[in-house]
Amino acid sequence: MQLLRFYHFIAIALLVVSRGHLGAQSVPTGRYVNLTHLDHLYRTVTLPNSATVGTIAIYSNAPDYRLVGDDDEGFTCIDDVARAALFLFSEPDLRTNTDKQTKLRAMTEFVLQLQAPDGVSGAGYFYNFLWPDRTINTTFRTSVAEANFWSWRAFWHLTEVYPYYQKRDAAFAGRILTATQKITANVVRDFGDKLNEYGRIQGVAVPTWLPFGSGTDQAAILLLCLANVQQRQANPAVLQLIDKLGSGVVAMQHGGPNQFPYGAILSFENTWHAYASDQAYALLRVGKQLNKPDWQAAARREIDNFYPWLIQQQYLESFAVKQTGATLIPIRTSQFSQIAYGIRPMIWAALEAYDQTKNRNYATLARQLASWFLGKNKTNTPMYDRSTGRGYDGIGANGVNRNSGAESTIESLWAFQRLEKYITTE
């Protein structure tokens, strides 16, 4: 599967250099993934119950890249720790690198510690943030234990690492299994019986049975979680819910090769946004696992038509639509801000499509998308610094935000980690 030869990929960086955006430098060698800044964001802390956990600082601000917290939320969160742990879990040297193994376990412990216990509101879901005094933020709106992004990311992480620990530490794996069983039960309870009904927003028919009604962004992560659960042990209720969620995601796709919005899967209600746009990747992966060719076809329709259109637009942050008759038209379009979390999902989807079809056009598309990180973007500025491992926080209307927080760094590293599987130096 090493289709993207090293020097083809390097040509992107050379193109940027030739435009004068990186300055004079020699062609780099070795990995594009650099964990230096991620290591800078990492700390171990001891909770009041004496558990030692691994954390990732949510913010790191230029020019000195000091670590920064948030007065309302805290200094670290499951949203970032779970993704950083998933990144480490996919590192090619994890099985031999004891430092990465230690950090993976400590971050997995963090995730386990933030699951709301029995007998409290939201039991089985996950809190998100930790305060500087090492206590859990259980009350702020982005941290309460509920059916929301941070719970899905915790769920995803635990379902991915369970087989790894099952072979290495039965007791730890048992705790992971118990945690996933609790949130699985919650998800089946809270979403399994929802009726397949539709509402209308600006004339657009939208499902009402996904997270927050029509949240395909959240449903995509849930699909990955539940597919992992189903793969481990078949469960009719889980399979039924997977079908329900997947059908809701597909129902939010509109347009086609010559019709706006060109096969885009709307994110929520009548809007599409770039961040968290893992719908195509999830439909491909879960569709392959459960033999759902219509899901795979829907994903390819978005990749084939919508992604190239976005590149032609020099990317967008979001748009909203209204429907008149059979036609959707844009009523609001925003180009900024553009962030790594809006680009990485498309790279993953394009590479998954290549894996499934062996069509070289998908590999080429992934390379085009990756060039956003290397300077082929609205500001002609690299958004990932390979020499430090920093992913910059975004492109706004006034230029580049050179802060390098957890999400931007992790999403950048995730993009290049996946791309490296298709690169060879031979």
Image (spheres, rainbow, N blue to C red):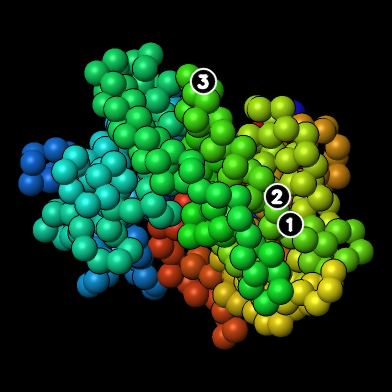
Residue placed at 77% from the left, 46% from the top?
Answer: 298
**Residue found at the very far bottom of the displayed protein:** 398
Residue placed at 61% from the left, 65% from the top?
Answer: 199
How crowded pointer 2 is (Cα within 10 Å; few <14, some 14-19, many 20+) is rated as: many
Q: Which residue is mark 1?
A: 253
Q: Which residue is mark 3?
A: 234
Q: Which residue is mark 2?
A: 250
Q: Are marks 1 and 2 in contact (CB under 8 Å)?
A: yes
Q: Secondary structure at mark 2?
A: helix
Residue placed at 18% from the left, 54% from the top?
Answer: 136
Q: Are marks 3 and 1 in contact (CB under 8 Å)?
A: no
Rendering coords of residue 225 (x, y %): 49, 37
Mark 3 or 1 closer to N-term? Answer: 3
Q: Secondary structure at mark 3?
A: loop
How crowded pointer 1 is (Cα within 10 Å; few <14, some 14-19, many 20+) is rated as: some
Q: In this image, 326 relative to 122: left or right? A: right
Rendering coords of residue 387 (x, y %): 52, 54
Q: Inspect the image, locate mark 3, and give the three-letter code of the amino acid beneath it.
A: Ala
How crowded pointer 3 is (Cα within 10 Å; few <14, some 14-19, many 20+) is rated as: few
**Residue found at the very far right of the displayed protein:** 258
Q: Secondary structure at mark 1?
A: strand
Q: In this image, 271 relative to 148: left or right? A: right
Marks 1 and 2, how far apart in space?
6 Å
